[in-house]
Image (cartoon, grey):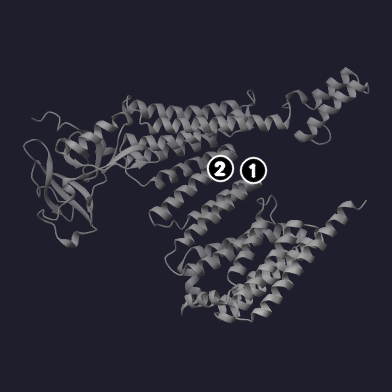
Amino acid sequence: MAGNANPSDRFLRQLRTEISAWTAEGLIDGNTADALHRRYRLDALPHSGGSRAFLFTVYIIGATLIGGGIISFVAANWAFLPAPVKVTGLVALLLGLHGLGYYLALPAQNRPGLAQAAFLAGAFAFGACIGLFSQIFHLEGHFSTGFGLWALGIAFTAFAVRSIPIAHLALAVSLIAYFGQVFDRGESIWWYLPLVTCLGLGFAYWTRVPLTGTATLLVAIAATLGTVATSHYNPSNEFFVTAVGLSLLLLGLSYLPHAPLGSRTLGLTLAALTAYSTSFLGGGREFVRAMGSREISEILTEHYLLPIAFLLSALFWGAAGGLGILRRGLSPLVVLALSGNGLLLAAWIAQRPFGFTVAANLATAMLAAGMLWQGAHRGERITYWSGLSLAGLLIASRFLEYDTGLLVKSAVFIGCGVAVVIGGLRFEQQVRTQETAP
Amino acid sequence: MKINGFALLAAVAVQLAILGSMVAAKGPARFSNDPVYLQVAPYDPYSILSGYYATLTYRIAWIDTVPGWDDSLLAQTVYVELSPDENGAYSARYVHAEFPRDGEIAEDARIIRGTSTSRGVVYGIETYFVPETERETVETALRERPGEVFAEVGIDRRGVAALRTLHLNGIPGSH
């Protein structure tokens, strides 16, 4: 085939529609239409992308229901069959579902949706096998171990068959296992965060599915914050450094090709929340006091989360620098977020309560200004209103916090309120003018 | 959609290996020929993944009055020497800190390995999955006739124990 050797499905579907129209209008005859159909193999093309996606969704829902049925059946404990029959049946089911998926994916069958559904049902069957084997052999263990083994087993399948639903199932199951360890057993698994981040983001990049990247980030953030929340010492320090590290990581990731959806928004939100939540004078004092006489290096190396967060940030920033930033440049808002994070870290290391509070306020103000500028400059309503809200919140917090006269407070509040309303109205007016312009 | 058959085969092999490793740790104990019978006491929570199960405790879990015990063994691995009574039920006779050598124990005695905790010795045989259809029967037996309920346990040469089944009406074949 001359020209583009691999035309997209979208082009082919459009071409098929056009050929029908050209034939109906008499521009081409039936023979030419058939020749074009043969040349582009249009008859092998699924009827439409929408119906294919719908069918795929139906298959996945069906497979999930079948999987749930298998697990319930196992949970009922299947009393009437002897153990060897149960084991043989379960292994046969596991092999059968994977074999069926492979068969349906063969070019001769060409049923990718059904094949993925069979693989997904196989992933559920593996979970059921773990439960049933525990039953049959009365194996002891915490439930999180079972979920961990389930996640591990199906992670391999996700890579082997490039299955996005199985990858998402593995992420969810692994998070249950991790939370089981952290919350129920009170034990931390140091390698969970780097492993799940590397595998999930690697899978997302390999399959070019940004949604999987986002799911991985959400799992990583949930795991990190969960661990920090249950940490046994100085949680505020860990929370702060981890939040800054994650914010850097997310902002860096957003410059990668096929970046996880929403990674920049998540990174900016985290930066804004961290700066604002540490901007209170009383909180700043407590925060710095919590560090006590310990060295920064001691805090960073004492707990695995902190070095890991920074290591990952550095790695991804390195990748982002090579791949994206040089080509596209940093947006001013991201520069402000990075500067704010840097300022906060520097003040934290200096261990000066007042200096830290000033830095946190500056960082919040910089982010608010950046959002306002970008929102107005690019006509982004959400960014503009977020910046305005952050600025209003910062000013209101300071005047609620510090001991000033009621009259001054009143004047500042009214002034802030009027400024916010005027700013908002002017912005909306500007956006409307741009929208109605010819 | 192109699937790499070898990659799929490897993934399924990993899953089978995981399942195999779950069973393998207690394989020799499970399939040994000479089980011991231990009297049990009940407790039954609910498992998310595996249906109903009973958490059992055994008379041999409480060994602080058994010869050989001293407080330095708390939170340690212990090797408990079991001997059978006239009905075939095993009870603790002596507590060893190390696995006893040949000749150090009686001919009819067995050694079971456990970890001593402040809540008694844990032997890794405390979970019994109850078939859903038999739940009430098992529950009633454990609650109303605990003296008649015995666990059939296999023990391998290292002292590792595996729970095989529960007998609700005394030891099979005993009078």
Closer mark to the observer between disc 1 and disc 2: 2
Q: Mark 1, chain letter?
A: A
Q: Is residue B102 visible?
A: yes
Q: Position of residue A172 (x, y in %)?
A: 52, 45
Q: Give amino acid for label 1.
A: Thr
Q: Residues within 10 Å of mark 1 (few under 14, many from 20)?
A: some
Q: Residue at x 37, y 34 (%)?
A: A132
Q: Is residue B152 visible?
A: no
Q: Residue at x 69, y 49 (%)?
A: A258
Instruction: State the mark number for residue A167.
Output: 2
Q: Give amino acid for label 2.
A: Ala
Question: In the picture, which quadrant includes the C terminus of chain B?
Answer: top left
Question: In the picture, which quadrant includes the N terminus of chain B?
Answer: top right
Residue A393, quarter of picture: bottom right
Q: Residue at x 86, y 28 (%)?
A: A18
Q: Nearer the viewer, residue A225 or A286?
A: A286
Q: Position of residue B65 (x, y in %)?
A: 11, 55
Mark 1 or 2, nearer chain start: 2
B164 lies above or below A201: above
Q: Position of residue B135 (x, y in %)?
A: 29, 33
Q: Which residue is mark 1?
A: A207
Q: Circles 1 and 2: CB distance less than 8 Å?
A: yes
Does A176 sit left or right of B125 as displayed? right
B141 lies above or below B82: above
Residue A54, quarter of picture: top right
**Is label 1 on the same chain as label 2?**
yes
Instruction: Measure how far apart labels 1 and 2 are at the Cα level.
Output: 11 Å
Q: Position of residue A225 (x, y in %)?
A: 52, 59
Label 1 sits on a secondary structure element that is helix
